[in-house]
Amino acid sequence: MSKTLDLYDIQGNICKGYGRYGFPKARYFFVNFNEVSASRNFLLALIEKITTAEVWPVKNDSSVKPNSTTNIGFTYAGLAALKLPERSLKGFPVDFTMGMKARAHILGDTGSNSPEHWDSIWQDDKVHAWLSINGRDDDEISQRYSEIKALLSDYPGIELLSGHRGPNDSILEYQDASAVFENGQATGKEHFGFTDGIGNPYFEGSGAHRSRLPGRGKLMRDGTWQPLAAGEFVLGHPDEAREYPPAPEPKLLSRNGTFMVYRKLHENVDTFAHYLDTHVKGFDGSKDLLMAKMSGRWPDNGAPLTLAATDDEKIVLDARMADLIQRTNDGEECAKGQLKQLRSQWIDFDYDNDKSGSKCPIGAHIRRTNTRGSLEHEKGAFDRPGALVDRRRLMRRGLPYGGIDEAMSDSGEQGIIFMSIGASIERQFEFVQQQWVNYSNDFKLGNDKDPLIGNHDGNLLDKHIIQAAQHGQPSEGQHGQPSKPPFFCTEMPRFVETRGGDYFFIPSITALRMIAEDMIDPS
Amino acid sequence: MSNTSGNAYALTTLCPIINGAILDAQGNETEAHDKVVRRLLQDIPLNEGSFFAAVDNTYFARLFILNDVFFQQGNEFEQDHLKSKYLCFNSNFHGDLKPYLEGMWNNCEAEVREIWQHCVGFSRVDSAHEFVRYIKACQLKTTLFFNGSNDESLAKQLKALYVKQMFSEFVLTQQGKSASETKQNFKYFLQRVQLNDLQSPSWKPGQSELKP
């Protein structure tokens, strides 16, 4: 029997991303609990506003779906300030207990990424809780924000923390985030111009439609996809090792809760644009192709390089898409099916026919952060092709920020609020960040780093290798002689810099109420 | 069980540390022998700074103190303890044991004496010949090989690492250059790296990181 989760007990944005459900705007703000009973009373009053993971129809249905959402998570210091019992506090994993700043060396938050360069809100360790609002538009965000601010003012003893760098050198008491809009429509773009946020994991009991499983679940030996175990993303449920993820006592405190990584990632848009302009000169292809070879997906529509690995192939793919869309709009059922099948390949693919990286470079961003079956270097080496990635999947829930109220530049405020949800920060996010983003031993690429988000320093050896196409039609598996030399992106600077963040525990509704009512009893 | 693999040798020795404390001139007990040894081991610098960097052909060496072991089988809780603490010395190196240990004595006699003087029976060791005899007496036959090297001489392996690093840099700097220019630059490259000179330029023994 398939697993069912109590979606009314799990906070929203965990099982399904708000972005897909018509909430392209968000505001994140952080509070400090000065006084414990006022803080608990505030939480109690807040509970009715908390949005859960209950299933909404994808199409707008205002009778079911709210106009805005509210969620909350706590740092370890926040839970300590709320006077959780010592025994419960000691049951939290060390990664969460230490917090993101103390894990800087694991994460590569060194040099210009290091905590002394972070926004001032992170400087004095006062962040106790993260509050988030997602909304259909700015007005809905403002309205919900005003409601929560009014609630906060009812409970002196909780401080709304300022210190987010905002546009035009402002310092704000909140961090706004928004999908990038084009022609009035929200897109999946981020500020370098890539289409982002494709291919989040699919797990058991999440309530997501079964049609979303291929490419998002775990790849089985027979080529089919199964949902990942719920315990990879929600505490209190068995994970991929058929174990309960480490979590504090009592079980009610952790069950249906999870952990979240919040990171403000600044994007050096000038540096990135300049790097592309400089290096495309020696590159055999368009600037879009160069970008795709860094990310693994074409910037304009997110098509993976496994579908179209050259400029010519992309033209063919685009034409085919345009044709299918046109015929679908004309009511052709057959075209509709073909279009759906083609679009599914944005997510449902592997690198079995691209072992050499001649289509998607082995070091490209998406091939690092979701390795699919590519680490099974010898067929049949593991139980499943993706055995090495199934426990390292990241549920990304962030949005871009900035780029609205000021012109974009390196010194401007634009980037991504990266939020990643999972049952173990250390096993999932930190592992991916340390071993796959900022190191390459698993890919046999030495010390190379992720071309987009690696913490490069502009040295000659800060490089990304774009493997050359094979002779003739690159029907992979054959080891044809490369027809051209590989292309080396060298002297890579730091395109993305960390500007702050921390690790948060997102309790269930049950646990939130127990925390608010001081009823946590691990004995 | 062989403790050689091609030209690589895996040495494991257990030398008993003298029980009890060191006596001063008046015959009073001072610090325990194993405490002094532990401090000495903890003070050995790593990588290039270690005295093992001066012992030719060392791939990997490690010294630690084995406090105790106990053996337990089934439900019967039977313990078997050691009668003393042991200085455990592992080394993986190129070549035969005798010349390796002679090289260790000849290059690092002071460091060897400082550490091993706290071991039972070492007071009789006063030459490279005696040191070889002593270590052989303490040797265990094991196959504990360090997986990070092959069985070539250390000089050859270090040169290979150096050439690999330099060649990577060479390749990265030739992108976009004409064939004739690359050919010319490759000549300079070969002159610079001196493929047949294993000593120089090369990585230093104990070097653990790429150095620009």
Image: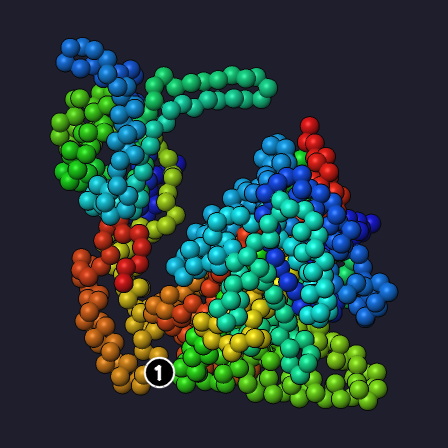
At a point 46% along the width and 22% down the height, the residue shown is B70
In the foreground, A335 or A26: A26
In the foreground, B141 or A435: A435
In the foreground, A140 or A25: A140
Q: Crowding near pointer 1: few (<14 within 10 Å), some, many (20+)?
A: few
Mark 1: which amino acid?
Answer: Gly
Give the quarter of the image for residue B9.
Answer: top left
- Label count reads 1
Q: Position of residue B124 (x, y in %)?
A: 16, 22
Query: Which residue is at the far right?
Result: A63
At a point 68% along the width and 75% down the height, the residue shown is A186
Give the quarter of the image for residue A218.
Answer: bottom right
Answer left or right for A328 relative to A388. right
A371 shown above or below A277: above
Q: Position of residue A333 (x, y in %)?
A: 84, 83
A267 shown above or below A8: below
Say which quadrant the C terminus of chain A sits in: top right
At a point 51% along the width and 78% down the height, the residue shown is A407
Q: Which residue is mark 1?
A: B176
Give the quarter of the image for residue B89.
Answer: top left
Q: Position of residue A252 (x, y in %)?
A: 73, 39
Determine whether the residue tagged by mark 1 lies in a helix, strand or loop: loop
On the question of residue B91 being in view, the answer is yes
Mark 1 belongs to which subunit?
A: B
Colour option used: rainbow
On the question of residue A360 being in view, the answer is no
Answer left or right for A175 relative to A40. left
Answer left or right for B67 relative to A318. left
Q: Position of residue A228 (x, y in %)?
A: 69, 54
In the foreground, A292 or A271: A271
